Image (cartoon, rainbow, N blue to C red):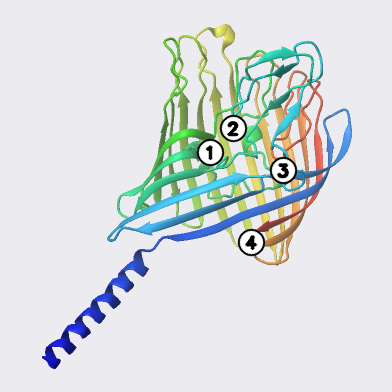
Amino acid sequence: MKFIARKSLLAVAAGMTLASTAFAQTAPSVTLYGRMDLAVESANDGALTRTMLQNYASRFGIKGDRSFGGDLTGIFQVETAFSPEDGKNQNVSTATTGTNAGITGGSAPSGGGSITGTPSTQSVVTKVGTTTGYLASRNTFVGLKSLSKGTILFGNYDTPLKSLDGAGLASTLWAEGDAMEVIIHGKGTKTAGSNFDNVHTRQNNNLVYISPKFADIVVKASYSPDEAQTTTTNQPLYSLSAEWDNGTYNFGLATQKKDVSDQAFGMSATKVTMGAKMGDFTAGLAFSTLDNNAAASANARKTNNSLVVLGYTMGATVFKFNYGMSGESAANAKDDLTMTSVEVGYALDKQTTLYTNYAQIMNNSNAKGTFTAADNFPAVGVAGNDPTALSFGIRYNF
């Protein structure tokens, strides 16, 4: 009896140990991460120079995963933008005060767009980008990951067109210097009444698939339904990319399309990126064509855009340069622009970098292109004015 009882106790203890080990292996792993990026900036909209303390997409988030055994893992991420220098909304500008300029009794959606309510004679805040003050304002998702079958995500997430950046080599400058959004994604083209918009690069209500890597190639696809669909309008968004990267050289191709309905314009884009690492030198190239898909030729708008990015590392110091060109949206539209940026950064350690950056946009007579990286860079009020920005900043990743 004693022998049997002892064997039974040993078996129970062994079973509890194995169960504890199995639980530890499948317990969820959660990570807190983020970035603080602030700089003193001399900002000029082409008419007035201001000294500002700017925030460049500071963010914090939590992410985690849990193994279900075998090849399947559950994953999630919640990422939020915030403005550490003043706690205000990110990427906002104010309109002038006047009759019907303000709105009371209404509310604005978190993703921008129209504001409902009663007109009044007060100033109104117009949202021109992602905002802080809203939880999960940046890439936020829940999904499943399989090393053999790929990853599927549901949430607010970058489209494959946006994430295609030459393995990071075509989008390396910080502060106001990065020209990817301004030039390649079309945020600099601001001709009034042209029915031409930038392509949407972070998409709400997005379903995303990321393939496993095979022969150094990764394929991404996304679909976002039009949740504002009506009896006359329906504009879902599709995006697809394929990228080859062998660690030294990179080549990628992406396409994105927002369907055209009978009452609205759509935006489509094609993008090509290339990148290379050659010792201490890096180089990236990006090209895009953006089209508003207008049915009537009088309303048609299309731009061809290009960007070159160079980098050189010398110890803890990194030198960067980019130059981008965005073409006219139509013949004689005179809304073309160029953007030039230079940057020097010094890494104090792996997490902290001091940097200085100078950027300039040269607008043609009808163009009103401006910078998009900071939370409150002044909009260009007069077409043809050329904004500049000189920044001295610090970036800390955690």
x then y, percent, for residue 316:
71, 65
**At 60% from the left edge and 19% from the top edge, which residue is drawn?**
196
Q: Return the disc, 1 or 4, that comes first in the chain's sequence.
A: 1
Circles 4 and 2, Cβ within 8 Å, touching? The answer is no
Q: Which residue is mark 1?
A: 162
Q: Which residue is mark 3?
A: 177
Give the Cα distance between marks 1 and 4. Answer: 26 Å
**Element class at badge 1:** helix
Which numbered circle lies on residue 154? none
x then y, percent, for residue 200:
55, 30
Give the Cα distance between marks 3 and 4. Answer: 21 Å
Q: Return the disc, 3 or 4, that comes first in the chain's sequence.
A: 3
Label 4 amino acid?
Asp
Q: Quadrant of residue 362?
A: top right
Q: Residues within 10 Å of mark 2 (few under 14, many from 20)?
A: many
Is residue 203 visible in the rendered image? The answer is yes
Circles 3 and 1, Cβ within 8 Å, touching? The answer is no
In this view, the mark in front (1 or 4): 1
Circles 1 and 2, Cβ within 8 Å, touching? The answer is yes
Which numbered circle lies on residue 185? 2
**At 67% from the left edge and 48% from the top edge, which residue is drawn?**
58
Left or right position of 194 against 156? right
Give the Cα distance between marks 1 and 2. Answer: 8 Å
Q: Return the disc, 4 or 2, that comes first in the chain's sequence.
A: 2
Label 1 amino acid?
Lys
Q: Return the disc, 2 or 3, that comes first in the chain's sequence.
A: 3
- Of residues 334 and 122, the one nearer the viewer is 122
Q: Return the disc, 1 or 2, that comes first in the chain's sequence.
A: 1
**Element class at badge 4:** loop
Left or right position of 96 against 250? right
Q: Count the labels in the image.
A: 4
